Amino acid sequence: MRNRIIIPEGIYAITDSKSGKNKNILDYSREILEAGVKILQYREKKKNTKEKYQEALLLRKLTREFGAVFIVNDDISIALAVEADGVHIGQDDLPIEEVRKILGEHKIIGVSTHSPEQAKKAADSGADYIGVGPIFDTETKEDVCSTVGLEYLEYVEKNLSIPYVAIGGIKTHNLNEILNVGAKRIAMVSELVGAKDTYAITKDIISSHFPLN
Ligand code: TZP
Ligand code: MG
């Protein structure tokens, strides 16, 4: 029997050392979780495996403390080693079916998608949720593909039943454009991690847009 967690609605927070500048990853992650975010993804492109493992281990502990879901970007072995709830992979990673074989039935697999074809394929291959984006311009992701705009988001909302997370350049000022389409899960990186007061902005977004979560 499958016993997989459904990814929570509301803000989907992602770590980012570039946006975080000199901030400590554990400090800003704690602020995000204290403000009420229920899912955190560890995403770190520039560190070696040992460093990533050590950070992920601490974040796993922290997310447990808050009862939040913990996802590791890219690295399936780190996800397994730290007992994360799942992984988030991209279009150039291992096929979803292979990731499922490695992780088993109970872990969450999220997949970044940029087109209806990719979304349908991810859903058919057993992904638990998809990323939909980048909706707007973003400086956070370095190898980012061109923006998909609201059109692709609308397509997913209308045509697919798989849970999805809207991502890319989503800020306080454009959040309503995404929510108006019907999106229930919103990834935010630089807006939270790069804020002067991460706790305050996160709390503010939650109380104005996701008061019931
Ligand atoms: N994937 C697509 S856009 C993106 C990722 C990881 C970065 C989004 O960051 P921001 O700062 O919310 O634009
Ligand atoms: Mg990736």
Image (spheres, rainbow, N blue to C red):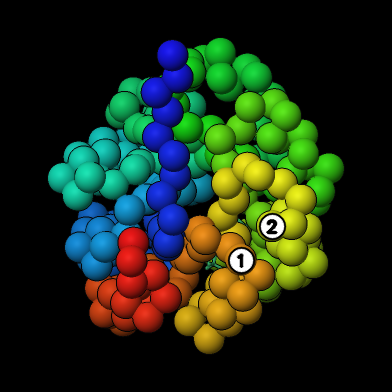
Residue 186 in sight in this render: yes
Separation of residues labelled 2 and 1 (CA atoms):
7 Å
Q: Residue at x 32, y 53 (%)?
A: 38
Please report contact status of discs 2 and 1: CB closer than 8 Å, yes or no: yes
Residue 120 placement: quadrant: top right
Q: Tag 1 or tag 2, which sits nearer the N-term?
A: 2
> Could you tell me residue 207's position as x and y percent?
32, 77
Near-viewer residue (119 or 201): 119
Q: Residue at x 77, y 34 (%)?
A: 121
Near-viewer residue (114 or 67): 67
Q: Is residue 208 left or right of residue 155?
A: left
Say which residue label 1 marks.
Answer: 182
Q: Quadrant of the N terminus?
A: top left
Q: Quadrant of ligand 1?
A: bottom right
Q: Is residue 30 left or right of residue 192?
A: left
Furthest residue in direction right, as rendered: 117
Residue 157 - label? 2
Disc 2 crowd, CA 10 A, few/some/many (<14, 14-19, 20+)? some
Q: Secondary structure at mark 2?
A: helix
> Could you tell me residue 73's position as x and y percent?
49, 41
Indicate whether 114 appears above or below 47: below
Near-viewer residue (183 or 90): 183
Q: Amino acid at mark 1?
A: Gly
Q: Is mark 1 within 8 Å of ligand 1?
A: no
Residue 4 placement: quadrant: top left
